[in-house]
């Protein structure tokens, strides 16, 4: 027998999702990022590189980068604290020094680090929120770039200067730019979370709109 109550819930969820997409798009309409004008150092074509970003709950950031062309793998994890406390329950206390982060492996022949910065600042999170991201509050949700090479440090700092000079955001960018010390992979049930739980209310409200914004704002990078 067809479940009418289930069908009704699906229709309501679809309508709610559409509304969220609209609200999110309007809220971020004034934050279209300029093209990154800083040149990267030459790299061997086709060699995989790594970038690490923190921008609130790693579920949504992970999903955004998984939809970027040229990205081969994204892992959710913890950066900034010790190995013995790199566990979700402890990190969630906000006292371990970790940030929820993602490790992105990408092919620079298909997508540049500068383009990843555009995705990070313009779609994946709000870089003007200090020690929080949307409904999530705490140092573990801070905005941070953990650079792997000196060139990544240079590019990240230059791009922050560029968007600041262009007054892209109404508030100052608070993103930390610090060297990567160690990345600790998160528990398996946190990996690829959005794809496995697309109808969870938190995902629908906070993270699905980011994918739509990526598709609209950076269509040449979306897959």
Image: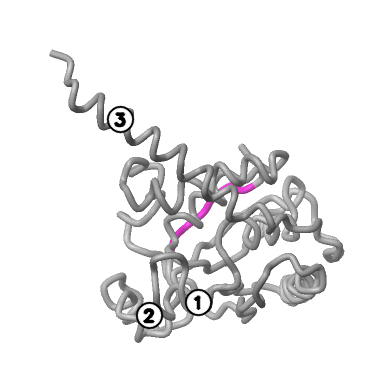
Upstream in sequence: badge 2 or badge 1:
2
Judged left or right of residue 21, residue 151 is right
Cα distance in 3D space between marks 2 and 1? 9 Å
Rendered image quadrant of residue 90: bottom left
Q: Is residue 75 magenta?
A: yes
Mark 1 Cα-neighbour bin, 10 Å: few <14, some 14–19, many ≥20: few
Q: Which residues are magenta?
A: 71-76
**Frontmost residue, 53 versus 201:** 201
Give the x, y percent position of residue 126.
57, 65
**Badge number at residue 83:** 2
Cα distance in 3D space between marks 3 and 2? 42 Å
The quadrant in which the N terminus is found is top left
Upstream in sequence: badge 3 or badge 2:
3
Check disc 1 and report the residue beneath it. Answer: 182
The quadrant in which the C terminus is found is top right
Give the x, y percent position of residue 121.
64, 62
Residue extending furthest toward the top: 1
Check disc 3 and report the residue beneath it. Answer: 10
C-beta proximity under 8 Å, tags 2 and 1: yes
Rendered image quadrant of residue 52: bottom right
Q: Secondary structure at mark 3?
A: helix
- At 42% across and 84% down in the image, what residue appears? 97
C-beta proximity under 8 Å, tags 3 and 2: no
Upstream in sequence: badge 1 or badge 3:
3
């Amino acid at each position: 027998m067809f479940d009418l109550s289930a069908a009704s819930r699906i229709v309501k969820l679809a309508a709610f999702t559409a509304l969220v997409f609209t609200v999110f798009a309007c809220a971020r309409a004034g934050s279209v990022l300029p093209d990154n004008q800083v040149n990267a150092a030459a790299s061997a074509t086709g060699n995989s590189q790594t970038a690490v970003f923190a921008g609130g709950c790693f579920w949504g950031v992970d999903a955004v980068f998984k939809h970027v062309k040229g990205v081969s793998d994204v892992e959710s994890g913890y950066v900034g604290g010790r190995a013995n406390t790199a566990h979700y329950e402890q990190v969630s206390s906000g006292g371990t020094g970790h940030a929820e982060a993602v490790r992105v492996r990408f092919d620079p022949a298909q997508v540049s680090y500068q383009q990843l910065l555009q995705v990070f600042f313009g779609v994946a999170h709000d870089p003007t929120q200090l020690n929080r991201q949307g409904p999530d509050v705490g140092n573990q949700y801070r905005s941070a770039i953990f650079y792997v090479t000196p060139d990544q440090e240079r590019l990240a700092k230059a791009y922050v200067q560029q968007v600041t000079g262009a007054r892209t955001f109404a508030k100052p960018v608070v993103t930390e730019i610090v060297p990567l010390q160690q990345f600790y992979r998160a528990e398996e049930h946190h990996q690829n979370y959005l794809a496995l739980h697309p109808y969870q209310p938190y995902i629908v409200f906070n993270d699905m709109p980011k994918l739509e914004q990526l598709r609209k704002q950076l269509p040449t990078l979306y897959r």
